[in-house]
Image: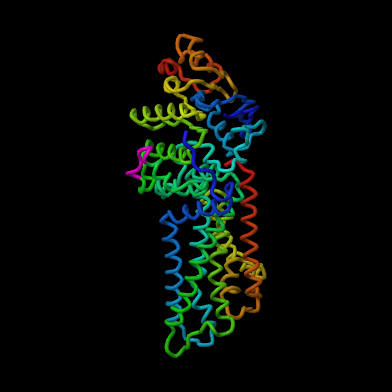
Amino acid sequence: MIEARGLSKRYGSAVAVDTLTFDVRSSMVTGFLGPNGSGKSTTMRLMLGLDTPDAGQVRIGGRRYRDLRWPLREVGALLEARAFHPGRSARAHLRALAASNAIPRSRVEEVLGLVGLAGAAGRRAGTFSLGMAQRLGIAAALLGDPPVLLLDEPVNGLDPEGIRWVRSLLRSLADEGRTVFVSSHLIGELARTADRVVVIGRGRLLADTSVAELAARSASLEDSFFELTSGATDHRGTPDAKAKTS
Amino acid sequence: MTTLAPGTARDRVRFPQAARMEWIKLRSLRSTWWVLALTVAGAVGIAVAVGVNTEDAAADLTNNALAGISLGLLLVGVLGVLAMTGEYSSGMIRATLAAVPNRPLVLAAKAGVFGAIALAAGEAAAFVAFFAGGAALPAAVPAPTLGQPGVLRAVVLGGAGYCLIGLLGVGLGAVIRHTPAAIAVLVGGVYVLAQLLAGFATWAMAYLPIAIVANSLSVVEPVGDGQVRFLSPWAGLGMLCLYAAATLGAGAFLLARRDA
C-alpha cells in the first residue's frame, strides 16, 4: 500500500508535480499514465526519497522510504534503464546491492535466472543491449523479494517476447498479494496488465480509477486517455506533417 | 508470497552492510586494480631511477626513494574522485541511494572502504619503493635502513599520503559530482596551485597537499630552504587529514541535501 499525499515538486520555475494525491493498493497492478513530461518519473523519484518534495509526502506501508529498515526487501524499484556502472558485471552489481540489505548471495543467482540473464551475468553490463539492461533493472527490483514494486517504463526496449514476459510477471506479482505500480506512456500496454490507473498530466492528477471505468468513458481506453490529457500536454504534433510546412 | 528471512543480527542497514556494498563495487571494477598497480609500479620505478643516479650520500635518501609518491598521488586522487562521480555519470547513484537511503552513511562507507584500500596500496608502494630505491643506489652510497631515526616514519607517512589524497578525491567527487570538473579541481588544488603560489605567496606553499606529502610526510628531517618553512611530519599529517575531513564533510552535507 502506497499513499501519496499532496506531493509537489518544482525544478527552478518548472512545476513537475503539483499537489498530487493518490493511493496504490496491494494485490493489483496499478498503471501510472501520463504524456511524456507529465511528472511520472519525478513522482517515482519522490516515492523513493531520491528527490525531496517541496510539499507533501509519500508513505509506503505507513512509513517514509528513508525510514525503511531494509529498503530493498520492502520496495523494489526500476527507475530507468542503466542505473548501474557500465564496467561492472551484472552479477557484481546485484551482489553489491544484495550485500547492502543483507540479502543472501543465492538470491542474486535466483533473480539472474528469473530475468534470463544467467548466461550473461559475468559480462560487463555496459555491453548490454537496452533490453538486457532493462532485465538487469528488473532483477535488481526483485532482489529483495519486496511486497511493493515501483517500475518506471519496464517494457522500454524489450522485444515482444520480453514485453509478454513482463506482463505475466507483473500479473503474478500482483496475484501474490504485492503492490505493483507501473508507469508507462503506452496506454495500450497498460490496458492489458493494469487493474487500476492513475493518470496525470502536467504534474496534476487527472484520474484515479479502474481500467474498466476509464475505458467506459469513451469509445476506447485510448480515446478516454487522450480526452483526459488533451489539455495537459506540451508536445503534440499535428496530424499531417505537410500542413505545417506548406 | 515468499519473503526473505528477516534481518540477520542487526535490524536495519548500517555501516557494515553499506561498507560491504562499497567494497564489492570497488573491487568489481577493473580500473581500481589497474590504477593501484600503476601507482605502486610508478613509485617503485621512480625510486629505482632516482637511486641509480644518486651521487650525494649526504642527501635525504629516504625522501629520494619516495620521490615517486608525488606523481602517484594524482592516480589515487583521481580514483577517489571516480569512486564518487562514477556513480553519477552511470546512474548507479540512484540504485545506491535506494538501497541505502541514509546518505551520509553511504559516503562514510565509501570513504572507509576506499581509504583502507588506498592506505594498503600506498603503504605497499612506499615500502617497496624504499627498498627498491635503496637497492638501486651505487655501491659507494650506503642505503638507508628503517632503523635510522625518522626513516620508518617517513616511509609510513609517505604511504599514508596516498590514502589522504584519495579521500580528498572522494570528498571532491561528492561535492562536485561531475568527473571532469572534480578532476580539474583536484589537479588544480594539488599541483597547479603550487606553481602559482611559488611566484608570490611562498609561505603558503607549506600548506599545499603536494608540498605536505613531498616535504613534510616523506622526509626524514623537515626541510626549510630559507624561503619556505615546511610543516613538521605530524603537523603535515594533521593538515592533510583536515583537508580530507573538510571535503568529505562538505560532500556528506551536500549529498544529504541535494536531489540525487
- Residue lying at 41% horizontally and 40% vertically, measured from the top left: A136
Q: Is residue A31 above or below residue A215?
A: below
Q: Is residue B33 magenta?
A: no
Q: Position of residue B88 (x, y in %)?
A: 52, 46
Q: Position of residue B253 (x, y in %)?
A: 65, 49
| Closer to the camera in the image, B141 or B98 | B98
Number of residue marks: 0
| Closer to the camera in the image, A122 or A75 | A75
Q: Is residue A114 magenta?
A: yes
| Bounds of the magenta segment | A113-120
- Residue lying at 62% horizontally and 69% vertically, measured from the top left: B237
Q: Position of residue B113 (x, y in %)?
A: 53, 58
Q: Is residue A93 above or below residue B170?
A: above
User: Toward which corner of the image does residue B190 lie, by quadrant?
Assistant: bottom right
| Closer to the camera in the image, B198 or B130 | B130
Is residue B148 shown left or right of residue A136? right
Point out the residue furthest to the bottom here: B140
Q: Position of residue B228 (x, y in %)?
A: 65, 74
Query: Main SS of the magenta segment?
Result: helix
Q: Is residue B111 above or below residue B3?
A: below
- Residue lying at 54% horizontally and 46% vertically, measured from the top left: B7
